[in-house]
Amino acid sequence: MSELHKFIFEGLPVRGMLVRLTDSWQEVLRRREKAKDAFPEPVRHLMGEMAAAATLMQANIKFNGALILQIFGDGPVKLAVAEVQPDLAFRATAKVVGELSEDATLKDMLNVHGKGRCAITLDPKDKLPGQQPYQGVVPLHGDHREPLQKLSEVLEHYMLQSEQLDTKLILAANDQVAAGLLIQRLPVEGSGNLGSRNEDEIGVNESYNRIAHLAATLTNEELLTLDADTVLHRLFWEETLRRFEPLVGADGPRFSCSCSRERVGSMLKSLGQDEIDGIVVEQGRVEIACDFCGTKYHFDAVDVGELFTPVNNQAPGSSGLH
Ligand SMILES: [Zn+2]
């Protein structure tokens, strides 16, 4: 079962988290396969890493809303998305145009011309009128314009920029498991520069550096195949870890899609009646499949008519959207 483990290093300003998405991750891929629209292997693995990373990032903040990790690519992968709710329900998808080689790198997929961008959006659940979601954007290259080879490097860069906190991320995915380890230096509250989050500590905290270095020795193979207890023991047996109750099952990471007929209806409405009527005339009905879960929504001429009829003009008993 998919699980998330949180821990702190006793007496040190360092915390960590380990996520393993198993059944939930397989479900994401299975649905796509069922729709006969499976992603190429490198895209599947990128999406798995994104799902693991977004779960870690959501679990790492106290925020009542969705965390949406998106990469906008300038190569064959136009977009890759992982979205995680505060209760750790997640979904992921990608849009691929054209061919990809089996060993395509991050650069080959998303950053062919150096224009790929990674966006992290925090979308509050109860938005105030006019409130915009918070969004941070980082390029897929480092400070010296060197292209970054791994998603983990892109996100470490983002965390340093947005939170001024050193973060080490190890991510790996195959078709069975999507997993990640996050190690982060904690801001030391109430010391010296209030509210500055110890920017002068970036890169120089010895405890953090030692633990991050240990974390970096974890191989993809180990992360994908070993259970959480074994991974943590193997890496940190000389440290004093305080572990918290793992989040599993209904409290843990799991696949869930928030699509609905009502939302698809609003999307169709936003395209305008002429456009939608045109499709109905041509194809008999509108069919929309959710990119995340594969659910198909159909709107025939009657449905479309209701969609564009103001609610108070509808016949009694008609619900507008079914
Ligand atoms: Zn869906």
Image (tube, rainbow, N blue to C red):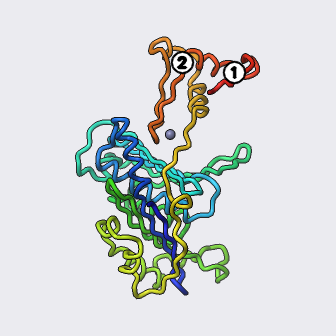
Q: Is residue 267 above or below residue 83?
A: above
Give the side of residue 272 with respect to residue 107, left or right. Answer: right
Residue tagged 2? 300
Quarter of the figure that contains the N terminus: bottom left
Q: Which residue occupies 69% across, 21% down?
A: 318
Left or right placement of residue 196 versus residue 109 in this view: right
**Total numbered badges shown on the rendered structure:** 2
| Amino acid bearing label 1 | Ser
| Nearer mark to the viewer, of 1 and 2 | 1
Q: Earlier in the sequence, mark 1 or mark 2?
A: 2
Residue 183 or residue 158, whichever sits in front: 183
Q: Residue at x 59, y 27 (%)?
A: 270
Q: Quadrant of residue 235?
A: bottom left
Tell which of 299 and 130 is nearer to you.
299
The image position of residue 267, as x and y in percent, is 57, 30
Q: Which residue is mark 1?
A: 318
In the structure shown, which secondary structural element does the residue marked by tag 1 occupy?
loop
What x and y, as percent, mark residue 41? 29, 48
